[in-house]
Image (cartoon, rainbow, N blue to C red):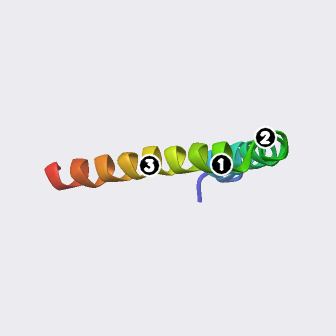
Amino acid sequence: MTPLRGVTMPLESLPLALLLWLASVILLAGVRIRNRIDAAVFRLWVKRALFVIALGMLAQYAYSLLN
């Protein structure tokens, strides 16, 4: 057992904590925006965001095939 075990465990979970914080911020922003704009425009933004996410996932998959 290393003496830094208690210190490294929280540091290892830091990326997950940051990701959850970012997701919460984006969720709240989406709720506020959804209430202020037209539903068709919001739907278009969501579709575009999902398309960008899908492209990112395809890029990750293609990268994993090359390595």
First along the sequence among labels 1 and 3: 1
C-alpha span from label 2 to label 1: 12 Å
Question: Does dot 1 land on a helix, a strand or a loop?
Answer: helix
Name the spot of residue 7 as percent of width and height, x first: 70, 46
Task: Give the number of the mark in front: 2 or 1.
Answer: 1
Q: Residues within 10 Å of mark 2 (few under 14, many from 20)?
A: few
Residue positioned 44% across, 49% down in the render: 51
Task: Please state if 23 lies on the left or on the right of 55 as rendered.
Answer: right
C-alpha span from label 1 to label 3: 16 Å
Name the spot of residue 23 as percent of width and height, x first: 69, 48
Task: Please state if 43 lies on the left or on the right of 31 as rendered.
Answer: left
Nearer to us in this view, 12 or 1: 12
Residue positioned 71% across, 52% down in the render: 6
C-alpha span from label 2 to label 3: 19 Å
- Kindly identify which residue carries mark 3: 51
- Kindly identify which residue carries mark 2: 33
First along the sequence among labels 2 and 1: 2
